[in-house]
Image (cartoon, grey):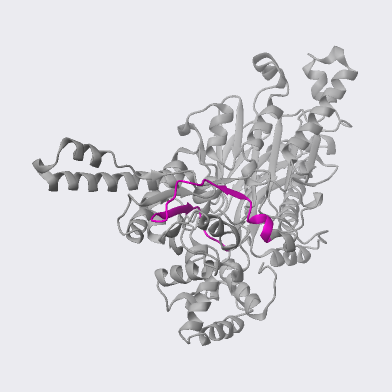
Amino acid sequence: MSDALKHECGIAMVRLLKPLQYYKEKYGTAFYGINKMYLLMEKQHNRGQDGAGFASIKFNVNPGTRYISRVRSNKSQPIQDIFGQINQRLNGVLEENPDKINDVAWQEENMPYIGNLFLGHVRYGTFGRNSIESVHPFLRQSNWKHQNLIVAGNFNMTNSKQLLEDLVELGQHPKEFTDTVTVMEKIGHFLEDEVSELYLKAKEAGYNKKDASPFIEEHLDLQNVLKRSSKNWDGGYAMAGLVGHGDAFVFRDPSGIRPTYYYQDEEVVVVASERPVIQTVFNVDIEKVQELERGHALIIKKNGGTTVEQILEQKPKKACSFERIYFSRGSDASIYEERKNLGKLVFPQVLKSINNDITHSVFSYIPNTAETSFYGMTEAAEDILNQQKTAKILAGGKALSAEQVTEILSERPRFEKIAIKDAKLRTFIADDNSRDDLVAHVYDVTYGVVKPTDNLVIIDDSIVRGTTLKKSIIKILDRLQPKKIIVVSSAPQIRYPDCYGIDMAKIGDFIAFKAALELLKDTNQYHIVDEVYQKSIAQRGNPDSEIVNYVKEIYAPFTDEEISNKTAEMLKTSEINAEVEVIYQSVENLHKACPDNLGDWYFTGDYPTDGGHRVVNEAFINFYEGNDKRAY
């Protein structure tokens, strides 16, 4: 993805099912859980680099002993920073108490971060500030163990304002207006309700106040708490929470938008946002890692009992396809194959663009995350070339000499490493005045492999804003003096804003949207923009379920190819000598490549939740009125 694009977050949870002494004896350290958390978080650093947080809970410690530990960081390398702080604290305690280095019971009672239950989070800030206060996990404190709540998630709610108003109606006064705080306070409110009801039952059964606590812990119904809390939630989410006494949950939205995977054996229960992370860190087979069902919660009781419970009625599965195209690590077996298929399926369009002339075409990719799709494209190119070679040999028959056959067979598609990113330079320079010049030097190119008679085919994950392509990449590629530059997107045209955790909130930023507007001007149909605005304004205030995505009418007069051609025209500046063409994946082929992740609202405008239609409505109104702000 040549444009800088951020994704919300990643989560990690570890619940140790054995006493800490067990891990000391088997693995040589009581820090087993902390070490595994470090690996789970570091291997998900691709999901968030604006901040990271870690929390732990220890069971059965004496009153007056700190049993919850939390550390957060928003420094430039936040994961390393928080675990550096943890190691420093642990080493400091052991240096002061060298005789306790093998005393696990003492360590559990006296050392921070050691515990039985751990929650970690990596964050990209798409909502709220990047201050330390915005970094997960969030903590809701109480003197009652079972009313302490720690929450972290990979999510975005479309109706944060409504959720805030709901809290006010419940008599609360939230300290912040972010979806994380409102969600945590909503869960916290119904957790308190549940605890209060159980306390009354305990009193009726003859328990005194002290003995009521174990009763409450045993009977606390997190399934009921989550059902009541999430009643009005609208968004994509994978929500994780720890209750102070030791219960835990992970809850996934009813459309399955955000990913969640888990694994359990006799030693641990582990949760992460990505499957191969669990496979690698715990060395387990792919079949043993389960995907959490949409609308369900994984609930882990303090006693170690683990169940998967339905919380909300399931909606059609609309798992985010961008997870497969770009965000998730490509080491997942299914994702790797799907990304290759994206490259294969888009190749027929490429072949048409180069007039079947593979011999005079050079194939490459930008950025490195597009490499897997590139492999798929190379396989398709090799298959086509082999067909062409076979046809030549059959056509020539016995008239071909051995040398001629050898020459035909020696033809190879030309796959080259054309662009190399300079790791010391970054494409998201803050100073706009100097950014354009700096961004033009982010990539180095390989000279000498492209001839003036060649087509240069470059595959990218997706084209969002087109800014880096226009200001940097196409200019750099043009230095190689190809006949034609063909930019291939393994994703379809991004036409609509995301509101479930990807940093694509402003519709006016998208190059496909800008291309459609230019086409409306060219064809004297710009009045459609005014009509869509009037329709959008007219439905403001309607229930979300009644809002129609009229923005589709902006694109309706044109074919995908017309929008692609206009995009290419807009990306080619006056100093570019080569012909420029842009090719996008089709939505149909996207679904063929990624059949289990059919979430495609950013391409089609078909949002999986009612709140999504309100967001696109507001995003268009903001664009039309010139308001440079988010729609949610």
Hey, which quadrant is residue 565 in on the image?
bottom left
Total number of numbered discs in the rendering? 0
**Residue 598 located within the stretch drawn in magenta:** no
Q: Relative to 177, is 620 above or below?
A: below
Residue 72: tell me if it is visible. yes
Q: Which residues fall within the magenta stretch?
A: 436-465
Please name the residue shown 59% across and 69% down the image. Answer: 507
Q: Relative to 87, is 158 above or below?
A: below
**Residue 441 located within the stretch drawn in magenta:** yes
Q: Position of residue 52 (x, y in %)?
A: 73, 43
Q: Position of residue 320 (x, y in %)?
A: 52, 54
Q: Residue furthest left?
A: 398
Q: Is residue 356 left or right of residue 556?
A: left
Q: Relative to 103, is 587 above or below?
A: below
Q: Position of residue 25 (x, y in %)?
A: 68, 14
Hey, which quadrant is residue 127 in on the image?
bottom right
Quarter of the rendering occupied by the C terminus: bottom right
Q: Is residue 142 left or right of residue 293?
A: right
Q: Is residue 65 left or right of residue 300?
A: right
The front one of 178 and 367 is 367
Q: Position of residue 137 (x, y in %)?
A: 74, 45
Q: Is residue 38 left or right of residue 447?
A: right
